[in-house]
Amino acid sequence: MHDTVLNTDAATSQGPEVTTMGLTMYRLSTWLKSPRPYLMFIGFAIVLGFWYLAVEVWKLPRFEDMPGLTEVFGEWFNKDPIYGLSVYTPEYYTHIGISLRRIAYAFLLATGLGVPLGLFLGWSKTFREFIFPLFEVLRPIPILAWVPLAIIIFAGSESPVVFLTFLASFFATTLNTMLGVESIDESYSRAASCLGASRWQVFRHVVIPGAMPYIFTGLQISIGVAWFSLVAGEMVSGQFGLGYLINTSYMMVEYPKIIIGMITLGIVGFASSAMVRVLGDYLMQWRVRELALGD
Amino acid sequence: MSEVLDRKVVADDSAKVDSDVAGRAAPEVTKGAICIDDVVKIYDPDGAAVMAVDHCSIDIPAGEICMIVGPSGCGKTTLLNAIAGFHDITSGSIHLDGELLCGPGKPEATPGSDRIVVFQNGALFPWKTNLENIAFGPLMAGKLSKSEIYDKARSMMADAGLSGTENNYPGEVSSGLRRRVEIVRALMNDPKVLLFDEPYRALDSLTKSVMHEALLEIYYRNKVTIFFITHDLEEAIFLGHRLIIMSSRPCKPKKIVDVDIPHPRDYSVLTSSRFREIMLEAKGVVHEEAQKAFDAGEKEG
Amino acid sequence: MKQGRFIGKLFSRATLRGLFAIAVFILIWEVGARSEQWLGFRMPYLGLIPPPTDVAASWAGLIGDPSYWQSWYMSFLRVFGGFLAAMAIGIPLGLFMAVNKTFYGIYFPTFEIMRPIPPLAWVPASIIFWPTQELSIAFVTFLGAFYTIVINVLGGARSINKQYLQAAQSMGASQWDIFRRIVLPATLPSIVVGSAVGMGITWEVVVAAEMISGGGSSGGGAGGGLGFFIWSSYVGGSYEQIIVGMISIGIAGYFSSELLRQLGGFFTPWLKTR
Amino acid sequence: MNTYSPDTVVPGAGARVQEASEIVASNLNKTYGAGPFAKTVIKDCSFTIESNKLTVMIGPSGCGKSTLIQLIAGFESADSGQLTMNGEPIVGPGKDRLVLFQESALFPWMTTYDNIMYGPRARGEGLKEAAEQAEFLLAKVGLEAFRDKYPTQLSGGMQRRAELARAMINKPEVMILDEPFRGLDNMSKELMWEYYATLYEEDRNTNFFVTTDIDEAIFLADRLLIMTNLPTSTRTVIDIDIPRPRKIEDLVHNPRANEIKKEVMTLLHEEAMKSFSGGSKAAADFLDAYSKRAG
């Protein structure tokens, strides 16, 4: 680590003419010159081509019931969809919107409770000794095993799903935040107390920013598991939402909608974790600038 | 710079440095005298008692640069941590200017801005800019207004040749510069004592030599007591008024060497004959201890 | 000496505090669950849960019931089936991607695009595709662990200290020898970590798949499993058994992870020396 | 260029007279990156590593020394220029040129013994003989008691000794050491110097040693190559004529050692001056110090 910092000194100080824009353009052009985009294209072509050929051309056994490539995309972008769902129907966005709303509630709640709890667990040994074992006892129970209990406790069909999603996020966030606090080099808090910081000031100025990278790793994991449990929750109980869409499409034998639901889930899931990452980079400028040196 | 060097022969133990040895008189330093009296520290992991510090007594007058020399892992850091207030001592006492830091009835000192540690791997907060790092102590104390603090921080940075890096994060500047920022951060609090825990260990020897001169320059401007742990004899003699060579595990003063080369010093000192004499005098003792530690296969750190 | 230390640890302050917190938790649960009976009003949420004493009683009744153990057996079978398949395919795939740049270039983007789709979203598609429900559960289970294992193996293999490879090269090692004696052991810790995480996900998926397929629509052949046990308890209205099922899965999940940890420790003896 | 002197070959049990394992670099160039990010690391660099001598290369950290090692070892190739060993161009790594790395590159998953045996096992040659040789080397570096320990169980000094043994068992024609004692504390370092010098004096193979430590360089070297700062080329070659075996005290006592030390310091100062105008941050530090010193 040390060595790379020393070695890059000369490289980074080459001058101000290297702008962010220039950097992006340069990276783009080297990327285009490398074989990577073309290999990526080949990869996609293989998968999509196989899907198309297996289902719609060769009609391989077991594939015959599957919705085909052209069927799915035809439906997805159809102004007048056969099964009533495409990018032109409001119903499609209702499902996305409801899933997103549930994720937002659960994720925000889990972050709001999990981050402070994790910080305190990492910071205070006494608090950890009391609370953490309880946490450890509850954690091995898979989130999905909570489904019936959640349905019993919470009225309606909405809150059980949000609760399950919350629970999954909450464990991931809390645990990572705690690990983050524990992994802060002791000399930082020692340095702060040397400089006359009170215990509370150490918490504010050292513990919180020091754990930040871990918190954001935790939040990335947390949003992933949130989608995971949301889909399961929506499939078992709940009205609307992408998981519900997939499950009902199966029961109504509207198979192309299953694939549309899956692809949409993939896109929305990816976008939401990208958002968390961007937010993290924004809040941790010191880290971005430090890492930029290593490039 | 004068090449005439005082050839005062130095007594092995209990040699007390008078401030005249420093060449440039530094009588204005009246605070920061450390008195370590018969300190013992026993670690107790797994029930097997490990003695880290063994009946150690050291007197450091105010304003002295006192170099603690010994092989890695011999317990020097334990002593430093006890002064800083990071952990307790088993018996004995440590006073700062006659005031009890830790001792009978008070096994653990409280960390405070009168004794500031400069850490082995550097402990600048990577999430704060250099300026924010330097302003940290006074901001915590809250005695001055924010603008006063930042003004003072800027002027101290300028004095130490750090202008232009105020808004950089520590991760963005060279490691040599980082060490300098860390020392300035400590000095911002007007401490009585600076405690250095092998701060230049990870630097290569060329960068290290630069840091030594920078440290001395800062010291001449702000005289404070310096308690400096190192395993590098050249560093120790170049910087120190006095070397305290420690025996390896448990840690205990083995030999005290006065460095009667007048301050201010610069690098011509390194090739002077007096420097070489002191080097030879200390080397034998240090080598013996290092060999002991080496043979024992002690882990580093 | 060693035993003494163990007993010391057993009665250490930390353990006692933990036990105390758990006891308080159970007590609150008991009081909350029986609030209607003891306090005359029903506490919100807690009042709807069966009390721990009833759960314990119900559990005691189930211990002798072979169908309860059959559920354990079925779930374990599915978990390990899916998990071993994920290991068998995921580890070589991850290693191959790390070693072969072209393959990595072709396959990795596709892999990354598929990854955000939650495994459970595959359930209906999987049921359509596979001839039996058992196979479709196995497939979804496999998928759950697969992504995690591949990502960990790939990450581990790509972050090997370059100096290890160069040192081996400069001693005249062949490509195959470097793979066998450097890449493989250097990746082992990541494989262990990936498997542990993958195991956790596998349990999640199995439980959900059992609930969805058993409790959901198609009343097909596949029954049993702890997830199904929970769901049928819910449908049958025996709420104590839901909690028994939850605890059982917790225990089962814990022991499978512990088993992996032990195995991992056995395969990476050098990590213990730190 | 110095001529080959026969007195450097020491007859003795372990000594193998090596005909000519001489590495010659002429007009090497190496640039990393492209476009606006191009960074020339090595420019017009020529030097000779003479056979049966210990050649030490010294230069400020962050100059292209490590890159040169990559080239000589054959892990990378130069953009232009010639690099030959015994007259043959160097292509790719080989066991005739063995590298000892900065910090330790002992394989953490192998015991000391397995690490030492790695080379012979990987090549699958002379295993029986190698096993004997391994025992001999273990004894020689004083690690018999640690043969079944993993590297993390060894102290820093022991790790370096184990690494020396791992290299020596392969009987390389040229041994390349890249700041091998970096990170050790000064006292262990000095012991390692003496230790390594003794090993070298026993069989006087060709050794190429890279360092940033002036004392280390003067204590060990037969020939001292002083490198310029980025882009790297050879500044000066100094023959160090302090008789062997040398003692650590020589660094203090020997007037010649002191003379050389002053000379090296001055040269490095000049290099720092030059690179300062190039804007290197590390160089700014050097400039600071050495300008004071020169006055």
Image: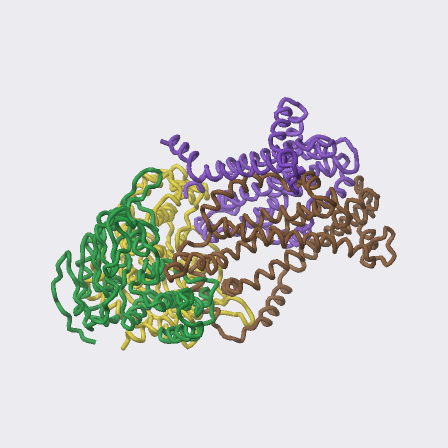
Out of C93 and D234, give the one closest to the viewer.
C93
Q: How many marks?
A: 0
Residue at the image position 62 percent from the left and 63 percent from the top? A31
Judge whether A222 appears above or below B201 on screen: above
The chain assigned the colour brown in the figure is: A
Task: Return the residue found at the far top.
Answer: C64
Q: Viewed as shown, does residue C162 lie left or right of D194?
A: right
Q: Colour of chain B?
A: green
> Chain D appears in which tint?
yellow
Q: Which chain is purple?
A: C
Rendered location of residue B138, percent (x, y): 40, 67
- State the residue in front, D174 or A86: A86
Residue at point 38% right, 76% down? B155
Q: Is residue A46 left or right of residue B41?
A: right
- Counting from the top left corner in percent of width and height, residue B240 is at 23, 64
- D172, B270: nearer the viewer: B270
Quadrant that contains the N terminus of chain D: bottom left
